[in-house]
Amino acid sequence: MSVYFITGASRGFGAELVREALSRGHQVVATARNRQAVSDTFPDAGDRLLAVSLDVTDEAAARTAADAAVDAFGRVDVLINNAGRGLVGAVEEASDVEVRAVYETNVFGLLSVTRAIAPVLRRQRSGTIVNISSIGGFRSSAGWGVYCSTKFAVEGLSESLHAELEPLGVHVMVVEPGYFRTDFLDSSSLHVEDQVIDDYREGPAGQMRLRAAEVNHSQPGDPRKAAKAIVDVVGAETPPLRLLLGRDTLGAVEAKIDHVREELELWREVSVSTDHEDVTT
């Protein structure tokens, strides 16, 4: 039996992860802005579920939640940083207030919770940190620039954390889902930038605004299957650094790798021409 600490646990991926972990007999600390929403979603969980109110952008509250987890269950084995916020619109259209709000949750909130739980994992010399990123953390696209930039940050942080914590017995994994049938594209999670610049209205960014509304609740990915896959892989003997979820993610990652490889070869001579003359390899 393991102890899971899951943020953003009242709905979407978070709720499915709580459900999956509980179904396997694990103990779960499930956090959300309103802990009652978690309790209402899992009324029969009993003492294996600790629902905690947590705004991930509040670092002191994150430390309090970590202490509550250890007080209740004695340890934490798996941290899943799932809480997130979206923003769709051209980069130039995004207001400073909205950009900062997305970063506060997706980047600084993730860091606050990680700093609160990592000392527990280090003391144990065991555990796993799972950071929920996105295909947008590997490949950006028109209309999602600000959101993708936060997920690029999550990817970079995860790679460094993996290198830093692996010698201490703690594994770090970043998960890259594609489009999944959750409420992420609802207004409760996704903000559509109010400002629309005419030059972008009919272009790729404007089309993405429309597509986000059109595909809502008809996305190809099944969040229950995603939760099962994540919990399965957490328990694997050699889990990966990156876990891709969904056929759309696989296709997008393969396309970007091919594009990067092609550009690398096309401009290789320019790249190596900038070395000092005494550099031969």
Image (cartoon, rainbow, N blue to C red):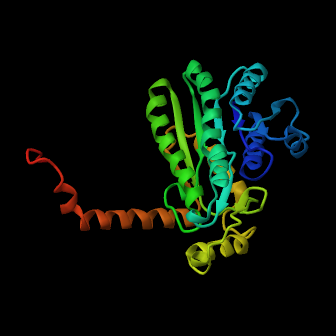
User: Residue 149: x and y, percent?
Assistant: 53, 54
Q: Is residue 121 above or below residue 33?
A: above
Q: Which residue appears at 74% of the width and 59% of the height? A: 182
Q: Which residue appears at 58% of the width and 34% of the height? A: 128
User: Residue 227: x and y, percent?
Assistant: 68, 50
The answer, for residue 61, to whether it is visible in the render is: yes
Q: Which residue appears at 57% of the width and 50% of the height? A: 150
Q: Is residue 54 above or below residue 142?
A: above
Q: Which residue appears at 86% of the width and 29% of the height? A: 47
Name the quadrant containing residue 163. top left
Residue at the far bottom: name it: 202
Q: Is residue 184 above or below residue 73?
A: below
Name the quadrant containing residue 146. bottom right
**38 or 263: nearer the viewer:** 263
The answer, for residue 247, to whether it is visible in the render is: no
**121 or 133: nearer the viewer:** 133
Name the quadrant containing residue 204. bottom right
User: Residue 165: x and y, percent?
Assistant: 49, 29
Quadrant of the snapshot with the N terminus: top right
Left/right placement of residue 72 relative to residue 112 reads right
